[in-house]
Image (tube, rainbow, N blue to C red):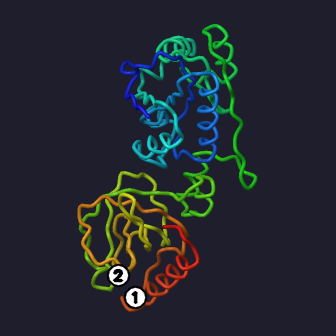
């Protein structure tokens, strides 16, 4: 997949394009349906399949409320790339771009720069200055500028419409089981191992403390895998403030089962599989060790029943 960082650098192949528009944060099961439909439509009509996405998220620029992203931009692009699309255009979203009228967006971006013949959008799609346009507006403009608009219906799971905002809410509460169901895979956090307080090693549970760019840290203690490259190892991961030792800034630390080596400076990926419990305050270190031994037993039993590595 080719990645273009702005409109001016987009250089499509000789073929016109089929375009899917959206933030695609999380690349969840709803996004996966859109991307699968995009690739199929482009292949059928001999078009180049292109994703048009934005960074930063428009809500961060327009200030309609705080928003935390499910993924970093690199994670989002990797997820889009796995769908088999030909190219992704990442438009830097700023005040100038947000001021595009609906007609300018259709004429200059879709018909002009992208040479679009098909445009795929979600049913709640809005665009143009002040979000004045919707998919019906786009369809009317498509008749004028030579592209067809294909609205993609939402995906329902457990009676709920799958959306990035729903998943953000679930992750912020630590509901990893539901979040993973809607993502279609385990939630991931990537980070560089930094030096921590060293308490885990003293307790017999040496942990890797991760400094991460991911914005959502689901609170609690989790069965997880932690690894690098193609290697994934069973682990226990904690997101919290270490209240037993006085509150610290919210952070992620991972104890990799049966690994005896230093990981300082290494970039790791933690995949959250199952939430065990809330983080809690223990009366002393011995009580904390007893609880961690129980958590470890739960993790070993979990991996003994499954092959998720």
Q: Secondary structure at mark 1?
A: helix
Q: Nearer the viewer, mark 2 or mark 1?
A: 2
Q: Residues within 10 Å of mark 2 (few under 14, many from 20)?
A: many
Identified at 64% across, 12% down, the residue is 141
- Identify the residue at image location x=46%, y=48%: 71
Nearer-the-camera pick, 268 or 37 = 37
- Circle 1 residue: 289
Tell me which corner region of the image, top left, top right, bottom left or bottom right, holds residue 77.
top left
Direction from residue 30 to residue 288 in the image, left or right: left
Q: Nearer the viewer, residue 213 or 68?
A: 213
Lower sequence index among marks 2 and 1:
2
Q: Residues within 10 Å of mark 1 (few under 14, many from 20)?
A: some
At a point 57% along the width and 73% down the height, the residue shown is 306
* Image position, residue 221 (x, y; %): 48, 72
In the rendered view of the protein, which quadrant contains the N terminus?
top left
The answer to whether 139 appears left or right of 239 in the picture is right
Residue 247 lies, with reference to residue 16, above or below; the image says below
Residue 182 lies, in percent from the top left, at 62, 53
Q: Which residue is mark 2?
A: 205
| Residue nearest the observer in this picture, 126 or 193 | 193
* CB-based contact (under 8 Å), mark 2 and mark 1: yes
């Amino acid at each position: 997949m080719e990645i273009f960082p702005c409109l001016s650098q987009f250089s499509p192949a000789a073929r016109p394009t089929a375009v899917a528009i959206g933030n695609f944060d999380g690349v969840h099961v709803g996004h996966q349906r859109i991307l699968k439909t995009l690739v199929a439509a482009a292949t059928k009509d001999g078009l180049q399949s292109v994703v048009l996405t934005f960074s930063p998220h428009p809500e961060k620029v327009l200030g309609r409320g705080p928003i935390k992203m499910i993924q970093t931009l690199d994670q989002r692009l990797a997820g889009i790339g796995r769908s088999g699309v030909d190219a992704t255009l990442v438009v830097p979203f700023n005040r100038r771009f947000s001021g595009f009228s609906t007609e300018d967006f259709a004429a200059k971006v879709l018909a002009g720069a992208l040479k679009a013949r098909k445009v795929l959008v979600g049913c709640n799609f809005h665009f143009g200055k002040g979000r004045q346009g919707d998919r019906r507006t786009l369809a009317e403009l498509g008749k004028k500028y030579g592209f067809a608009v294909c609205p993609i219906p939402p995906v329902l799971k457990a009676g709920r419409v799958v959306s990035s905002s729903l998943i953000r809410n679930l992750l912020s509460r630590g509901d990893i089981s539901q979040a993973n169901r809607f993502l279609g895979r385990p939630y991931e956090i990537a980070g560089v191992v930094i030096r921590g307080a060293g308490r885990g090693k003293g307790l017999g549970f040496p942990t890797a403390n991760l400094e991460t760019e991911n914005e959502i840290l689901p609170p609690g203690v989790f069965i997880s895998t932690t690894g690098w490259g193609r290697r994934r190892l069973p682990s226990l991961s904690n997101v919290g403030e270490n209240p037993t030792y006085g509150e610290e800034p919210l952070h992620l630390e991972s104890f990799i089962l049966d690994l005896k080596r230093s990981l300082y400076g290494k970039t790791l990926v933690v995949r959250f599989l199952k939430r065990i419990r809330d983080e809690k305050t223990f009366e002393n270190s011995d009580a904390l060790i007893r609880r961690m031994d129980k958590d470890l037993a739960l993790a070993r039993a979990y991996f003994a029943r499954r092959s998720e590595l």
